[in-house]
Image (cartoon, rainbow, N blue to C red):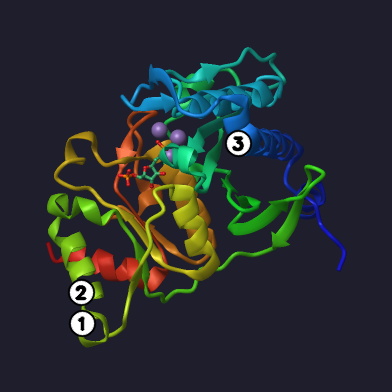
Amino acid sequence: MARTNLSEWLLHRQVPPKLAETMTSVAAACAEIAEVLRTAPIEGISGVAGTTNVQGEDQKQLDVVSNDIFIEHLRPNRHVSALVSEELEEPLLFERSADEGGLAIACDPLDGSSNLDVNVTVGSIFSFLEVPADDPGAHLLQPGTEQIAAGYAAYGNSTSLVLVYQGQASAFTLDASGDFVLTAATLTIPSESAEYAINAARERFWDEATRTYVADSVKGEDGPLGKRYNMRWVGSMVADIHRILMRGGVFLYPLDSETVAKGGRLRLLYEANPMALIVEAAGGRASTGPGRLLEAAPSSIHQRIPVILGSSAEVERIERLYQQL
Ligand code: AHG
Ligand code: MN
Ligand code: MN
Ligand code: MN
């Protein structure tokens, strides 16, 4: 069968040139990060950087390197007016002439960085927004429904790139020559599943809805959900969501008594929103518990949010538990 690469797919999907060129820049950044990760222990760029980011997390050297790679690929792209990153306190605004700019990228340059030193899948997550070229900085706080595209790369036993555009999510695999080859034209999440992903060590902090869902699941065939569940938690959102896109399941990082003061654990603009857009395009559902995740209105670029997403029937089950609270 003839192979379709990313540039052919961008033409075939009739992605407008501005967005297509910017998706290509982001894909090139991801390919370079994949390459850096492969030999990082040899190059001595494992471990902590000795710095903290705006969220108070200890940065890994590779968090910093990956952030730099995103900047290196996006700064020269004349369509890009702004870059929001987990690792940058303030948005980076680029000087563009009057007929340039208009796009903003929000990214998590390296997701799951606690898994770096143990050679477990990590990723990059990104969201594309339209912003006015003359004042990009004032238009970065858009709800997820306004994203014009989004995606992630998963650096696992192969490097996957997933892109969503106009309600369709597709997956590519990086080949030996550095080309992204289409390997799944349309991703679809089964509506039913029996696999959930949650950090169960946080049980003492959970709210009643989360507690009930997990308690019902572990009761198996004899419980109220009537089936036997399995549990997976990688600790890299990208890896957990990629598994759910491939075979179904539900991912939960709910609001709990410890994260409530911060509004949740995961970040809205560059973790939750892009993943929610992909999951909805694949027929899944993305929720905060009480409401649709993509409709949440951001009030700051590093805002956090509770995240429940995956197979639609499972997410609906959890939403019903929230309605009963
Ligand atoms: P990041 O490495 O970009 O800071 O994100 C880590 C996130 C996410 O990938 C993962 O699902 C979650 O943190 C894991 O949290 P716990 O350590 O609480 O399990
Ligand atoms: Mn981090
Ligand atoms: Mn992350
Ligand atoms: Mn990160």
Give the Cα distance between marks 2 and 3: 40 Å
Q: Nearer the viewer, residue 47 or 193?
A: 47
Please say whether residue 132 is visible from this viewpoint.
Answer: no
The outermost residue toward the right is 2
Q: Residues within 10 Å of mark 1 (few under 14, many from 20)?
A: few
Which residue is tagged 1? 224
Name the residue rendered at 38%, 40% in the picture. Answer: 268
Q: Looking at numbered disc 3 in the image, what kind of residue is underneath it?
A: Leu
Q: Nearer the viewer, residue 223 or 131?
A: 223
Q: Position of residue 190 (x, y in %)?
A: 49, 73
Secondary structure, mark 2, is helix
First along the sequence among labels 1 and 2: 2
The outermost residue toward the front is 42
Report the side of 228 relative to 169 (left or right): left
Which residue is tagged 2? 216
First along the sequence among labels 2 and 3: 3
Give the Cα distance between marks 3 and 1: 44 Å
Residue 275 in the image: above or below residue 320: above
Report the side of 25 relative to 210 (left or right): right
Q: Residues within 10 Å of mark 3 (few under 14, many from 20)?
A: many
Secondary structure, mark 1, is loop
Q: Looking at numbered disc 1 in the image, what kind of residue is underneath it?
A: Pro
Q: Residues within 10 Å of mark 2 (few under 14, many from 20)?
A: some
Q: Looking at numbered disc 2 in the image, what kind of residue is underneath it?
A: Asp
